[in-house]
Amino acid sequence: MERLREEVYQANMELRDCGLVTATFGNVSGIDRSNQVVAIKPSGVPYGELSPQKMVLVDLEYNVLGGELNPSSDTRTHVMLYRAFKEIGAVVHTHSTCATAWAQAMKPLPCFGTTHADIFYGEVPCTAVMRDDQISRDYEEETAVQILETFKHYDYNQIPGVLVACHGPFAWGQTPHKAVYHSLMLETIAETAILSLNIDPGLKAIKRSLLDKHFLRKHGANAYYGQTGKE
Amino acid sequence: MERLREEVYQANMELRDCGLVTATFGNVSGIDRSNQVVAIKPSGVPYGELSPQKMVLVDLEYNVLGGELNPSSDTRTHVMLYRAFKEIGAVVHTHSTCATAWAQAMKPLPCFGTTHADIFYGEVPCTAVMRDDQISRDYEEETAVQILETFKHYDYNQIPGVLVACHGPFAWGQTPHKAVYHSLMLETIAETAILSLNIDPGLKAIKRSLLDKHFLRKHGANAYYGQTGKE
Amino acid sequence: MERLREEVYQANMELRDCGLVTATFGNVSGIDRSNQVVAIKPSGVPYGELSPQKMVLVDLEYNVLGGELNPSSDTRTHVMLYRAFKEIGAVVHTHSTCATAWAQAMKPLPCFGTTHADIFYGEVPCTAVMRDDQISRDYEEETAVQILETFKHYDYNQIPGVLVACHGPFAWGQTPHKAVYHSLMLETIAETAILSLNIDPGLKAIKRSLLDKHFLRKHGANAYYGQTGKE
Amino acid sequence: MERLREEVYQANMELRDCGLVTATFGNVSGIDRSNQVVAIKPSGVPYGELSPQKMVLVDLEYNVLGGELNPSSDTRTHVMLYRAFKEIGAVVHTHSTCATAWAQAMKPLPCFGTTHADIFYGEVPCTAVMRDDQISRDYEEETAVQILETFKHYDYNQIPGVLVACHGPFAWGQTPHKAVYHSLMLETIAETAILSLNIDPGLKAIKRSLLDKHFLRKHGANAYYGQTGKE
């Protein structure tokens, strides 16, 4: 558990150092699949006061496993994603500026270029707005319900992030570090997309063949980017 | 008084460190309600030269209580807010870029998302433009008059900030630290709102049920965010 | 002369530290009126390699007074401004992003708020585009000619800056430090103005009475801002 | 080779320090023309882990000359540019935000001002979108084919950069340092151009006479900018 806490702590600090956090908005969690334990940032604690020991451990039924601190108020969203997306090892939530701007506009983020296509295999979807009956139930669980509803039509391994309507982005990955990376790239492509629309308000997504080429040169059986082939 | 000065000094430095200050624009004050004394940043002194001792003490009739420095030229606005808003402990004024852009556009900042709803219970109002007869009277007092006129229709405890038309934002809170936090969040949501309008120029505010849910999970009797429940 | 060089050097570094400089674009000069000597940044030298001794001294006929380095390629523009604007002590030229965007758009910067009105007594004018016969003469002198032509209709003491069409901003002041401050404020209001137009594309300048109030509370016989009255 | 590696390493770090790099996107290469050897950043290695020794050496037939690391996945694009543009000594590729926004919008970057004209002698072209038959061949080679096709109509010595449609910018120069400088200036003018279009959506490029004046005062036989004439 110490290693998980350390890794989740480091990823939370990385999130802040990337400029993705305003005040205490933003949190990273990670899961130890063999023990079914999730480590997550405590709720409302300033980043400067965090430490590995302050990462809160919870099980998949939301029980806090020791410690004095409340887990992030978004914990139930994280945990439900772990239950549904069996292959992910970490979840990140931010209110990063440009991705949040898209979420607030309630629009999917179109794939306008190869930076996007390198990470996300097509548009990053935006959930439906939460219905009133959902809001009156468990809000954080229903946030996950919104996401899972949306991913009936997408592959979470190929699109490691989502825009929650009127709220902000979630991203995930195999490790806390990778999930933070996906959050950073989501913010980056969200910003570039807004600027591209400034230049051409009628801009359309790139063609399928280009999307395929870029995503598949970094992912899947025939990937050839990075040092992987040498290791 | 030393503790108040220290707290107000720290909050002024925090304001600068958040990137909310250009040159000497921006000031924080705090009030000691039991002694009816306000500590405020001196006028036109560079942030790098401030110290707790340089915070100027004034009473609620604007009298300077000792010291060599003039208080901020906005002192009368701060003091009038303390007289009218009995439950606040601190006031912040900035010319932060995006909140000022909304103030200059003379438009209330609509609630486009949950980041906004977490802090402000609905739109952040914009005052009317100051009338010529007001300008010819005491300008800084009339700035407060504008704000108080506007808050006949809003609850200052639920909307801890305002846009003064053609000028810039004021925010407040129970402590100097919290008032700075509200200033920072006002700037953040002002920026995100501009970007959301870039994506969808016809965007409308979020629905009431979502606003209620987000504001009330952090505020009021049933709040469950942060560590409060454990302390 | 050493004091002038030191002051001009410090102001050049301040310009960079304010974020107003990209690569080697941007320069500050100052004048010793009693000796009719101007100190100016050398041409094309990286900011990290500057020192007070590297500031180049020139007289008002453009003669370099000793030293190994060429003065800034904009020297003739600076010098002509000193000859025409008798009360200024320093000139700053930058290609700062937002002020340059207005200059490239060939539009005066309207006064949309009190931040602007605190420094510039009305719109910051934009020169005419340089005519071909001017371009074929001494380009840097003609840049000053453009500015001086424009200021037939403005008071350089009340509007301490200008946008040179298709090029970028110049600002001035009584000291190098103040001229840098005017450059910084010009960039700030240029940015805020673009954002205000994003929110309301039809926005008009603030009314005269508000402009008068703000400019005159910081400038002229009845100014009451800052610590001046105490010194 | 050690000097080349050192120079290429320094330029890669400079690229990051300029803020042109997000995550591992972005790479600099340099060529030793006498030995026909190119040094280039390794693929997918974080900037903080780079060293001169990790720069990968390749020949002009793409053979890696020793070392354990894979060269940048963009190596073939760099090498083909060296083969075609005989006078360049370095190539830089980034996904810098604003230049990428133009590339994604598939539009050439018009010359809106003298900052642009100081570096690029006219618009920075945008390539055609890659055809499907190209995508199915060697993608990185075809990226160079796109660029070379475009430069049939431009002079690579006078326009040291290009926007690759749906992808991002490439820039080049006589040294790694200069190529990084061109990348930085391309990002700068791309940003300013977007802002100028915000102010005036119908803005046109500057006139030819002004373009000539600015480009030619820094380049070619009659250049008079900087310290060159003294050295």
Image: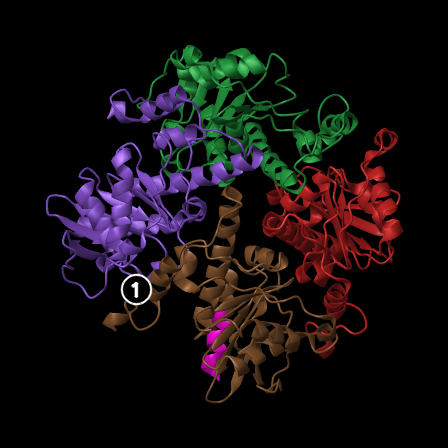
Chain colours: A green, B purple, C brown, D red
Asked whether, in this view, residue B137 is left or right of residue A228, the answer is left
Per the rendered image, the range of residues in magenta is: C1-11
Q: How far across and down, in percent of the image, does residue D216 sit?
A: 77, 68
Q: Is residue C2 magenta?
A: yes
Q: Residue furthest left?
A: B35
Q: Chain of mark 1?
A: C
In front of the other: A151 or B191: B191
Q: Residue at x 26, y 52 (%)?
A: B142
Q: Position of residue C231 (x, y in %)?
A: 25, 73
Q: Is residue C154 magenta?
A: no
Dot 1, crowdedness within 10 Å: few (<14), some or many (≥20)?
Answer: some
Residue at position x 75%, y 65% in the image: D215
Q: Looking at numbered disc 1 in the image, what kind of residue is underneath it? A: Tyr
Tell me where residue C115 appears, x and y as whole percent: 41, 56
Query: Majority secondary structure of the magenta segment?
Result: helix
Report whether residue B225 is seen: no
Q: Where is residue A141, by image quadrant?
A: top left
Q: How many marks?
A: 1
Identify the secondary structure beneath mark 1: loop
Return the residue at label 1: C225
- Whether residue A52 is visible: yes
| Viewer-proximal residue among A118 and B104 | B104
Looking at the picture, how far across and down is residue D217, in whole percent? 74, 70
Residue in front for this viewpoint, A76 or A130 = A130
